[in-house]
Every structure is written in C-alpha cells, then in structure tokens.
C-alpha cells in the first residue's frame, strides 16, 4: 500500500520491511511518500532498518530530499528511491548509514549526496537517470562505495568536493551525460578497480587542489578524454587501463602535477598523454600504445618527467614537443610509430637522455623550426626516413648518442640549422652517417662515423659547418663528400679504411681542410672533381689505393704543407679526359639533379645513389644482404649488369626520371622491366616475388601516366586509358597476394587511389577503349567504395585526405562529363542541377583534403599542391576567374620551388596562370579577347599596378621563354624581340627589387643579365634606326643602375663587386656621352644613375665588399655620399623644371636626397624630404 505519513521519522531499533511479494518493483509495492516540503523518510538513530520499500517524493520543486539521514547508522536494503523533486538520498552530519542493493533513480537533483562528516557505506546499488550527479561527496565526508552501477546521470556519475576522502572500488560508472568521476577542491578520494566507460566527457576529471589515488581502473570508450588533471591538482594514477577514448587518454593542463605510474594507455583517438599550459608531473613505466596523433604530446610551457615508458605503434608521432614546452624524457622506449618517433617543433626545448628510439616508419628524432633542446646518450636505430633529422633554424645539442642502421641516413641536417653534434657514435647507416645540406652550419666534434653503407659525412647545397676531431672510417663510399657550393671547415679528423675516396669534392665546392689524417682508403686519399677549389693545409694523406691527392682537369685549390705518400701511383695527379670509368660513374651519381631535394620521402635514399648526369646512366645490381630474395642496392661503381634482379634498380631510376618530368623514358624503362619479369624472369625469384614486383611496376605506371597526362595542355585519352588499366592490374595483383602484410595492404590502397583517379579522368574524357563514360565512372566509384571499407580508426589524417581528394576528383570529373554531354544531367531539389551539386561537393572535398595535408606536410608539399590546383579550378568554375587567380598563383609558386621552372607540371601551371592574367588584362584594359595580347603587354599592365612578381611570372610564360634565349640569327625579328623583352625585364626586375624591404640579389643578377642582353642587341642596330639608338641608351641606363645595385650587394652570379662597379661606371659614361644633346629629362636620368653609382660604391665600402686604396675608408665613404647628394640635387632640379615636383621621376630624386641627408646630417635633416616623398607617392600611387 501507499503510506503518506508526512515524515516517516525512524525510531531506534525499528525494522520496516515489505511483506513478501510486495517488493519495490512488484505490482503491489510498499510505498512511503511525501508531498510537502519535508523528506519522506528521516533518520537520526542507530539500529534502524528499512528493506524492500519504495520511497517517493511528490512535493514542490526544490523540496527537501526524499531520504535524509542526519545521524545514526540506518540500513536501507533493496529499497527504491525515486521521484524526488530535489536530492534522492541526503546523508549528512556524522551519520554512518548503509545502502545495500538499493536503486536511486529519476531524481531531479543528485542521486545520493554526502555532506559534512558523514561516512556511509553504499554497495551493490544502482544510481541512474538523475538530473544532478549520481553520487556527490562534499565537506569532510568519507565513506565506502563498492560494486555500484552508476549510469545515465545528467552531471558526472560521481563528484567529490571539499576535503572528502571516500573509497570507490569495483563500481561501474558509465553512459553519463557529463563525465564519469569529477574531483575538485581538496578531494582525496581513492578510486580503485572501477570500470568507467562511454561517458560524454572525461572518464575521470581531477581539478582544484585534489590529490586522489586512482588505481587499477579501466577508463575506456569515452566521448572525450580518459583522465584529465587540471588547475593545481596532483594525484597518483597507478596501473590503470585507459583505452579507446576520443580525445587524449591522459591529459594535464594549467599547473597540474600528477603521478602516472604503470598505466596502459592505448588506442586513443586524440593521443595518448597530452599536457598543456604549465602542467608538470611524473609519468613513469606507462605503456602508451597505438594512439593517434601522438603517443605523448607536450604543449604550452609544460615541463614534466617521463621515465621508463613504452611509446609504440602509434599512427602519428611517438612524442611531439611543441610551442614552448620543455620536459625531460629518459629511459623510454619509443618504437614502431608511423610518423617521427620524437618530433620537436616551434621553440620547444626538451631534454632527452637514455631513450631508445627505433623501427619508426618515419624519422627517429625530427627537430624543426626554432627548437632547441639537449639530446644525450640516446640510442636510435632502424628509422626509415633517417634516425635524426634537423630542419629550419634548429640549435639543439646532440651529445653521446648511438645512431645506427638508418635506411635513409644517420643524422640529416637541413635548412639553416646551427646544431651541435658532439661525441656520438654513428654507424651502419645507408646514404650517409651525417648529411649536412642547404645553408646549415653545425658544429660536429669528436664523433665516430663508421661502417656506413653510403658515405661517412656529406656536406652539400651551400652548407658550411665546423667538423673537428671526428673518426670517419669503413665507409662504403667516400668518407667525406663535399659538393654543390658547400664550404665546410674540417680540422684534425681521421678519415680511414673507406672503400672509395677518403675525401671527395665536386661541383663548386670549397672549404678549409687542416691537420686531418686521411689513410688506407681504397681509392684516392683526396679527390677533387668538377670545379671544386678547396684549401688544404698540413694534412697527412697515406696509403691511398689510387694515389694521394687527385685533381680533375677543371679542379683547383690551394695545397700547402701536406704530407702525401706516393702509394704506387703519383702523390699528386692532374686529371685528363681519360679518367677511369669508376670516377666518371661516381661523378654522375653525385651530380644527379635534386638527389637530396626530398630527403624525408620514400624514395630519397635511392635517389641519393641513383646514377644520372649528362654522360651516361649505369645500372648496377648487388644482392641486398638483409633481404637477399627481394632487394638489390644501387651501386655507384661502373660494372657490368650481373642479372641479379634489375627490377628494383630500374624502378628506382624510373621514379627518378618521372620526378624529373621524363615520363616517356620512365615508361619505356618500366615496360622493359615488366618484360624481364615475365615467365623468363630471374631464376632465383619465385612466382610470388615476381607477382609483387609486377604489381609494383603496374602501380608506378598508373601514377606515372596520370602525371604525364596532367602535365600536358590537355589530358591525353590514350595515356589515361593505359593509366587506368595499369591501376586495375595493380589492384588485382595486390588483392591476390596472401597473406597480406602491412606493405601489401598499403600498396593495394595506393592502387585503389590511382584506379579511382584514372577511371574518373577517363569518365571526364568521355570514355575510350572498352570503357564508356558510364562504365569508367562505375569503376571509379567501385574503387572508392573498396577504399572506404579499408578505413579504420587508426587510419592517419593524411590518408583520409587522399580518399577525400579522390572523391573530389570523381565528383569533378562526373560534372565535367555531364557538361561535355558524355553523361546526362538531372534536376535536383531546390532548382539546382546535378552538375552544379557535383562541382560544389568536389570543392568542399578538396578544401578538406587541403586542410588535412597542410597539417600533415605543410603547404609547400607535392601532396598539398594537388589540392591547391583543384581548388583553383573549382573556384574559377563556381565563382569566376578572380576567385581562382590567387589559388593558381599559389600553385605556380609552390611548383616552381619544389619542381623547378622547366618541369612539365610547372609549365602547365604557368600556362593556366598566364592565360588567366591574359583574360584579366583583356577585361580591365578593354581589349578584345580575340586580340593578341603579348606577354610584355601583360607584364606592363601588372607592373603599372605594382604586381611585380606576377609580371615576372608573365614574362616567363612559354611564348616569352622562347624569346629569352638568344636567337641564333642576329638582326632577325626574333633577335630584335629578344632585345626588347630583355630591356623591359631589366627595368621590371629593378623596380620589383626596389619595392621590397631589401633588394634581392637573385632578382638583381637577373636584372643585370637582361640589361647586358639588351645592350648587346641594340648596339648592333643603333646605326640603322633612331628608335634602336634610343633603346641602346636606355639599355646603358638600366645596365648602369642594375650593376650599381649589384655592386652594393657584394656582386652576384658571375660578377664580383669590383666587376659590377666597373661595368656600371663604363655604361653610365657611354650613356652620358650619347645623351649630351638630349632633352633635360633624359640628361637627368643619367645624372640620377651616376648618383646611384656613387651611393652604391659607398655602401659597398661600408659593407667591406670594396676596399679603399688611396684614402681612409671613412673619408672615401663621406666623399662618395657627398658626390651622390650633389648629383641627386642636380637631377631633382632638372626633373622639377620639366615635370614639376609631383611626378614619379622627380620623386626618385627626392627619395635619394632624403636618404643621403639622413646619412650625412642625421634623421632630422632627412625628415622633411621623406615627408615630401610620402605625400607625393600617396597622391600618385595610392
């Protein structure tokens, strides 16, 4: 029955029990209820007991709790508490009640609230579907909570505040609409062996100054993080399993300082352990496995200790330290991660010591941007893209590490790195034990570089650096290789026992080599090839197999005080055209174009060894000792073809040719190799191995022919049909190979990618061969569907981007096919057509892929630029040419930087860009689109609008490029056009350089070259036509200005500073002589240019590019500045008389007068002239 007694006030020793069969969930339960603002049941006594009763409260909202225990030890068993308009059970005072096998549900407030100093025991109960917390502990309460099921509450399942210290053991806390456990203020609860899962927010959130003990819990499948510690909280988190959470498994932020010990943190979709802000703490002996993004991510100013952890098998980075994070990582094992084992970016400065970083599928340790840090006594091995890679402006310390067995190399140093590499053992790496590239300037002291499968030390691409007291021995190739304008300093190194030359210099390398010992190398001790010019002093060169020091026919340098042993050959030799074949092969290899341009991608290690150059290509195969059945290595010695499986070597060279744009040569080489792999393939290769390589080559052809077709003006239908069939073959091969390992699955996914791309393009072209537009579209859709089914929760974002990109291409190609009439259009809801919907869908997909690729690779990547290309096409299609222009400009700049100006894809991008510029010009200048618009016209328009870089691009479009090389026939129309374009470029590039913050030497060298070309042309024509005489004078004028500026910049290209000054002086003297009788405005031009020359000479003297021989340096500088000021004032007077003060000619003189007065008399003297310049330029130029 129902007992509406007002308040049931329990008496001591009274036991209220429901009759058998009248339990709280039966059809006739015993119900104790209240309707007013008071509890249904209240207890203040000991010995009371209630069992099998249903307790309800139907009073007004905000009423007293349904059950209130103010004192005593009442025991509630098998009771149901529900319907409360506030709290279900309120336990307060110093009470010690017990709730066993009860159910607290459907309350408008908290399910169970414990306050004051209460110490309840709650066991085997269900607390669910309450509008507040499930269980809420406050004050100084404690209590024991075991084997309860807490779920589906609107706030956290369990919350603790104040100084409470309860024990929660063996509970299920799940499906909460907020978090699982939430501890705040100074709570010190113990959470042991609980199962916490499927909560909307963090499984366990610890804030305030809480200090809980969290042990042996399972925290899983949360829709946000697993465990989050923030504010000033601490706590001990021991032996927990934290898995499959949507955000980080364990997170720390603010000033938190937790201890995480012996936890398993796995399969997190947002990372394993992530620390933000000023978080600290200790993380030791944890297993951080199979997490996305990063096993450990450190941001902000976080500074924690990570000791003895295992971080492995992540689909992102092992450890990512970014922003200004610090932290110490020691004694950790970091292995088998898809991206870098450890990446340090931004200005982060961690300390890593005694870690093992191995078997990564990318770099082992990647440091970039302005990061610093100390990396000591770590062991790095078998990382695919290099054991250690330093990029940009890194200034880290690498000390006493062991770095071995890197497939791409030991340490790769790029960008403007100034790292210190000291006391490391670097051995058994392919490529190079240390490779120093770009403008890097490291210090490498006291390292041991030994047993390298490639070179010991490589310094190239304008790199510098100081290398002292290193032991470099047992290298398969040169012990030290220096090439491509590099200038290192090697002091007191020992370079010995190599299987090629000890030191090899090529190209335009220089450098200082002193007090080195070079001995027992199989080829020369020192070989100087190409146009290298080293300085070698006080070195000891002994026991060289082919002599001591060898100089090629064009090589040179300074050699003083060296001790060189005559080892059966001449100690010093000069090369001839009959140099040995092995030397030619070595040179061809080292001068291969862009051999290290992409040092962090799959094929870079093979490009390093790939032969090339202008003379010959030699393929040499040697068995790979590690994988004798599958692999071969490219050798750099010239030898006969041994027939030991040339397929892989041919694939290396074919990819190299394809990357260089030599598509036809690449396909021909692969066809030959496919024939070799038919039934007559090498005897030692089994059918499975042949099938694998057949699939590899079909896959490469599918990619190669797509790129070939894309680089032409119009996609070739024949190429695309062959590309689609190659992709189909590859997909069939890789699908049939059993069992499938990770490599095979990856190849199958790549085959589906190219299958979808190529068949989508065949659809766009209207079909061909056996394929109609519809059947090609169906084949592409099928490939996309199969690829979708391969996506898992561990698929990295950049792979998802590839799938988004190919979906975008498919939608785009379907729309294009409809537009061309190959497929029928449809009317969609809202009045849109299927074609328009497809275009909009493809743009959305490309933009998403672009964002993913930017995050993974950065904007300047050959992956990202594909999305940029397509976004430009779609923006133009949907929003007009102006919307697509910026994307086309971005594509062109990136392709020029990554692929070079002559690459077919760059030329195609330039064709697209300049056609849009032509269209823009025709619209904005009123010219008809049918009227021929020359590149010079386009450039003139852009220059007038101060779009100098676009103008330069316009002048490099295909029709202009043909005019830029000197025509063979002088006095021909082509020759005259070449002169006109050169003259225009000389002016254009000068203005472009002048409009930037600092003059660019590269731009000024090109400007100078153009002016030389213009003067050459019109000097031969001036006698025949007054127009040519005028252009000859203009050429001399720009020649004087450009070479004066080049003098100021310290020379450049093939001109020294003094040569640049002499050419400028001579040109302006000739120009002055020819313009003696010219109008004032023309004479003012020459006077102005002479002022520029005086100014530039003074600047060159200040910078040390020129020396004063007849007077003191300061006197010469002041004299030249005074001379320049007088000339500028004279030019100003003439131009003002002709044009007035508000004119673009006059303002040039005003600019320089202000500059000179500032230099000679101080800032105040130049201020008035600068103010005048600003007003005039604002009025004239905006």
Image (tube, rainbow, N blue to C red):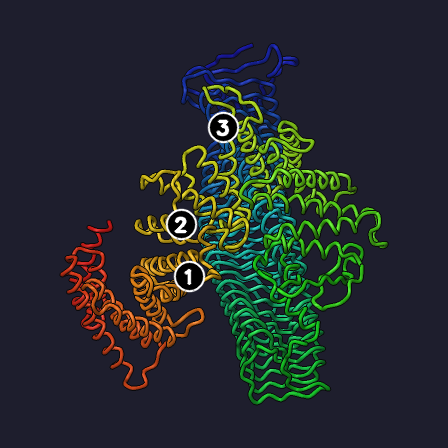
* Disc 2 crowd, CA 10 A, few/some/many (<14, 14-19, 20+): many
Q: Is residue 790 above or below residue 1164?
A: above
Q: Quadrant of the N terminus?
A: top right
Instruction: Give the side of residue 1182 with respect to residue 742, left or right.
Output: left
**Marked residue nearer the N-terminal end (3 or 2):** 3
Q: Residues within 10 Å of mark 1 (few under 14, many from 20)?
A: some
Q: Which disc number belongs to residue 739? A: none
3 vs 2, front mark: 2
Q: Residues within 10 Å of mark 3 (few under 14, many from 20)?
A: many
Residue at 34% over, 67% down:
1039
Where does residue 817 sit, x and y in percent of width and height?
56, 29
Give x and y (percent) for residue 1149: 21, 63
Q: Residue at x 68, y 76 (%)?
A: 578
Q: Is residue 1024 left or right of residue 650?
A: left
Element under disc 3: loop
Residue in the foreground of this view, choosing between 73 and 743 = 743
Mark 3 → mark 1, Cα distance in angstroms: 89 Å
Q: Are marks 3 and 1 in contact (CB under 8 Å)?
A: no
Residue 363 location in percent, x, y?
A: 60, 57
Q: CA distance from mark 3 to mark 2?
A: 69 Å
Tag on residue 971?
A: 1
Residue 1123's quadrant in the figure?
A: bottom left
The residue at which mark 3 appears reads as: 154
- The residue that label 2 is drawn on is 935
């Amino acid at each position: 029955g129902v007992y509406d007694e007002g308040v049931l006030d329990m008496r001591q020793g009274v036991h209220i029990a429901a009759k058998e069969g009248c339990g709280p969930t039966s059809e006739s339960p015993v119900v104790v209820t209240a309707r007013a603002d008071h509890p249904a049941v209240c207890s203040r006594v000991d010995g009371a007991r209630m069992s099998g009763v249903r307790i309800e409260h139907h009073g007004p909202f905000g009423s007293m709790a349904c059950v209130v225990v103010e004192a005593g030890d009442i025991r509630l068993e098998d009771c149901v508490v529900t319907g409360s308009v506030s709290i279900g059970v309120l336990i307060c005072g110093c009470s010690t009640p017990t709730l066993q096998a009860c159910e607290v549900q459907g309350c408008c407030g908290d399910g169970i609230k414990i306050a004051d100093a209460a110490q309840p025991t709650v066991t085997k109960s269900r607390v669910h579907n309450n509008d507040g917390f499930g269980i809420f502990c406050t004050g100084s309460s404690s209590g024991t909570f075991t084997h309860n099921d807490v779920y589906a509450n609107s706030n956290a399942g369990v919350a603790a505040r104040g100084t409470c210290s309860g024990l929660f053991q063996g509970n299920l806390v799940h499906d909460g609409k907020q978090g699982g456990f939430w501890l705040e203020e100074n709570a010190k609860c113990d959470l042991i062996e609980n199962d916490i899962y499927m909560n909307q927010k963090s499984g366990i959130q610890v804030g305030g100054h809480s200090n809980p003990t969290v042990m042996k819990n399972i925290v899983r499948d949360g829709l946000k993080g697993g465990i989050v510690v923030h504010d000033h909280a601490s706590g001990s988190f021991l032996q927990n399993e934290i898995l499959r959470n949507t955000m980080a498994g364990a997170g720390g932020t603010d000033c938190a300082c937790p201890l995480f010990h012996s936890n398993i943190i796995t399969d997190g979709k947002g990372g394993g352990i992530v620390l933000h802000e000023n978080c600290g703490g200790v993380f030791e002996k944890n297993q951080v496995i199979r997490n996305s993004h990063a096993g450990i991510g450190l941001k902000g100013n976080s500074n924690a200790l990570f000791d003895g952890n295992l971080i492995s098998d992540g689909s992102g980075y092992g450890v990512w330290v970014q922003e200004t994070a610090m932290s110490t990582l020691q004694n950790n094992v970091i292995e088998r991660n898809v991206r870098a084992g450890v990446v340090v970016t931004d200005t982060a400065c961690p300390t890593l010591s005694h870690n093992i970083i191995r078997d990564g599928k990318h770099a082992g340790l990647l440091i970039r941007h302005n990061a610093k840090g100390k990396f000591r006594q770590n062991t790095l091995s078998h990382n695919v893209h290099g054991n250690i890679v330093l990029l940009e402006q890194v200034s880290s310390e690498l000390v006493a590490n062991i770095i071995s067995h890197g497939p791409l190399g030991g340490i790769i140093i790029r960008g403007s790195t100034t790292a210190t590499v000291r006391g490391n053992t670097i051995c058994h790496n392919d490529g190079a034990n240390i490779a120093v590239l770009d403008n890097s300037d490291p210090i490498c002291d006291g390292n041991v570089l030994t047993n390298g499968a490639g070179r010991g030390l490589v310094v190239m691409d304008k790199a510098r650096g100081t290398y002292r007291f290193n032991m470099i021995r047992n290298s398969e190739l040169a012990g030290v290789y220096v090439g491509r304008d590099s200038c290192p300093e090697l002091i007191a190194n020992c370079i010995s026992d190599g299987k090629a030359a000890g030191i090899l210099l090529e190209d335009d390398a220089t450098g200082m080599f002193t007090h080195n010992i070079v001995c027992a190398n199989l080829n020369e001790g020192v070989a100087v090839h190409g146009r290298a010019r080293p300085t070698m002093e006080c070195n000891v060169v002994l026991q060289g197999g082919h002599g001591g020091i060898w100089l090629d026919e064009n090589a040179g340098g300074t050699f003083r005080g060296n001790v060189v042993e005559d080892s059966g050959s001449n100690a010093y030799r000069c090369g001839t055209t009959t140099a040995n074949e092995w030397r030619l092969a070595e040179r061809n290899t080292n001068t291969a174009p862009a051999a290290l341009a992409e040092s962090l991608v799959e094929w870079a290690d093979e490009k390093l060894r790939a032969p090339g150059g202008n003379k010959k290509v030699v393929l040499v195969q040697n068995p790979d000792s590690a994988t004798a059945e599958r692999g071969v290595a490219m050798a750099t010695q010239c030898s006969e073809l041994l027939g030991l499986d040339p397929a892989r070597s041919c694939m290396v060279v074919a990819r190299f040719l394809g990357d260089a744009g030599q598509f036809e040569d690449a396909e021909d080489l692969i066809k030959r190799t496919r024939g070799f792999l038919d039934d007559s393939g090498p005897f030692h290769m089994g059918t499975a191995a042949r099938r694998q390589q057949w699939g590899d080559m079909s896959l490469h052809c599918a990619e190669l022919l797509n790129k070939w077709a894309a680089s032409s003006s119009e996609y070739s239908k024949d190429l695309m049909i062959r590309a689609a069939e190659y992709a189909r073959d590859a997909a069939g091969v890789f699908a049939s190979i059993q069992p499938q390992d990770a490599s095979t699955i990856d190849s199958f996914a790549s085959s589906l990618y190219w299958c979808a791309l190529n068949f989508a393009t065949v659809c766009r072209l209207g079909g061909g061969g056996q394929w109609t537009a519809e059947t090609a579209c169906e084949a592409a859709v099928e490939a996309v569907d199969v690829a979708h089914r391969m996506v898992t929760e561990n698929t990295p974002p950049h792979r998802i981007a590839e799938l988004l990109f190919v979906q975008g291409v498919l939608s785009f190609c379907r729309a294009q096919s409809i537009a061309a009439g190959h497929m029928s259009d449809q009317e969609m809801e809202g009045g849109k057509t299927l074609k328009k919907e497809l275009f909009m869908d493809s743009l959305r997909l490309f933009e998403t892929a672009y964002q993913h690729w930017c995050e993974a690779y950065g904007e300047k990547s050959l992956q990202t630029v594909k999305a940029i290309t397509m976004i430009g096409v779609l923006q133009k299609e949907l929003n007009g040419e102006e919307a697509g222009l910026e994307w086309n400009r971005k594509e062109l700049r990136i392709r020029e930087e990554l692929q070079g100006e002559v690459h077919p894809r760059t030329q195609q991008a330039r064709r697209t860009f300049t056609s849009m510029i032509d269209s823009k010009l025709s619209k904005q200048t009123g010219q008809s689109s049918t009227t021929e618009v020359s590149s010079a016209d386009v450039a003139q328009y852009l220059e007038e609008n101060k779009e100098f870089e676009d103008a330069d691009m316009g002048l490099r479009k295909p029709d202009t490029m043909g005019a830029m090389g000197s025509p063979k026939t002088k006095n021909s129309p082509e020759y005259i056009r070449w002169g006109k374009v050169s003259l225009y470029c000389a002016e254009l590039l000068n203005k472009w350089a002048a409009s930037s913050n600092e003059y660019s030497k590269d731009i000024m060298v090109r400007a100078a070259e153009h002016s030389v070309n213009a003067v050459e042309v019109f000097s031969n024509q001036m006698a025949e036509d007054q127009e040519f005489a005028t252009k000859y004078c203009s050429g001399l004028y720009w020649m004087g200005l450009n070479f004066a500026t080049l003098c100021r910049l310290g020379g450049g290209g093939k001109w020294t500073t003094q040569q640049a000054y002499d050419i400028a002086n001579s040109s302006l003297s000739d120009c002055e002589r020819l313009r003696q009788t010219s109008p004032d405005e023309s004479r003012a031009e020459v006077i102005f240019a002479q002022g520029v020359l005086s100014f530039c000479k003074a600047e060159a003297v200040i910078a040390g590019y020129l020396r004063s021989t007849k007077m003191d340096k300061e006197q010469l500088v002041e004299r030249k500045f005074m001379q320049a000021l007088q000339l500028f004032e004279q030019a100003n007077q003439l131009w003002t008389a002709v044009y007035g003060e508000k004119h673009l000619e006059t303002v040039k003189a005003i600019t320089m007068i202000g500059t000179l007065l500032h230099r000679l008399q101080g800032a105040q003297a130049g201020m008035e002239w600068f103010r005048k310049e600003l007003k005039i330029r604002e009025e004239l130029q905006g």
